[in-house]
Amino acid sequence: MVSAESALKAITLDLKKYLMKPATRKREVRLSELKEYFSNPEAADKILSSGRDPTIYEYYEFAVEEAAGHLSLGLTTIYPGKVGKEYFMTRGHFHLKPAAEFYYGIRGRGVLLIQSEDGRTEYVELKPGVIGYVPPGWGHRTINTGRGRFIFFFAYPSDAGHDYGIVKEKGFAKMIVDERGKPKVIDNPRYASST
Ligand code: PAN
Ligand code: ZN
């Protein structure tokens, strides 16, 4: 049998409640923590000043240990919504080591946006059943472009590390906005002005 002490791990993805068990980490990110990542922080302030601080996304992660050779597995839920015209999204990061990652779309509609260190971007729609492969060295962010929750599974080398600083400083070169009810990828004006 597989027990918590076993070398073999059996991890359950609950596809009704969209949770992962066991998890070594669970994190919930609310608008107040993320507001400066959106291109229109005034729109974020407007939501916050109405007394709401919505959860933008949450994720579960399971790692035996954050050491070379291991894999970290996880499940992310991004809630539907917008700040101004920009859809709810993850903070986004680069890995500290050149480590790849894959994302597997489970529910809802969303986009995986990747960016090289010199600012080239590519993106793919992550519908249920689609795997997005993030190559080593590329920053990545996910965006919920649908009306319901956007949920995906991910896996990456446990010793990859996370660098959130570059994204905080420069953002992503592209952003995804709602234009008459449809997602549109546009240049991020704040990225252009910081280079
Ligand atoms: C994912 C992300 C998760 C949350 O697990 O960590 O979706 O996004 P942020 O880390 O950008 O807040 C991943 O890419 N891990 O490496
Ligand atoms: Zn990552």
Image: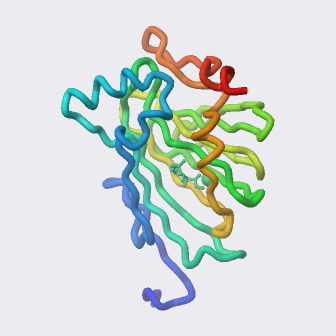
Q: Position of residue 147 (x, y in %)?
A: 37, 28
Q: How is the image coloured?
A: rainbow
Residue 164 drawn above or below residue 7: above
Q: Taking 116 as reference, is 182 left or right?
A: left
Q: Is residue 165 left or right of residue 2?
A: right
- Vertical side of 101 occupied by 33: above or below: above
Count of numbered badges drawn on the protein: 0
Please, is residue 66 above or below residue 148 in the view?
Answer: below
The structure residue drawn at horizontal position 44% and vertical position 72%, both measured from the top left corner, is 24
| Residue at (74, 60) in percent of width and height | 97
Q: Which residue reaches farthest right?
A: 118
Residue 158 is situated, as x and y percent measured from the top left of the image, at 63, 69
- Front position in the image: 194 or 189: 194
For the C terminus, which image quadrant? top right
| Between 2 and 69, the one nearer to me in the picture | 69
- Name the residue at 40% across, 45% down: 57
Q: Quadrant of residue 139?
A: top right
Position in image of residue 47 (x %, y %) = 28, 27
Query: Where, quadrant-wise, is the N terminus in this rendering?
Result: bottom left
Q: Looking at this view, name the residue that lies furthest to the left.
A: 51
The quadrant holding residue 181 is: top left
* Residue drawn at point x = 46 percent, y = 87 percent: 2
Across and down, in percent, residue 162 comes to: 62, 57
- As drawn, is 100 to the left or to the right of 126? right
Quadrant of res 117: top right
Judge whether 139 appears above or below 52 on screen.
below
| Image side of residue 40 versus residue 195, left or right | left
Q: Nearer the viewer, residue 2 or 133?
A: 133
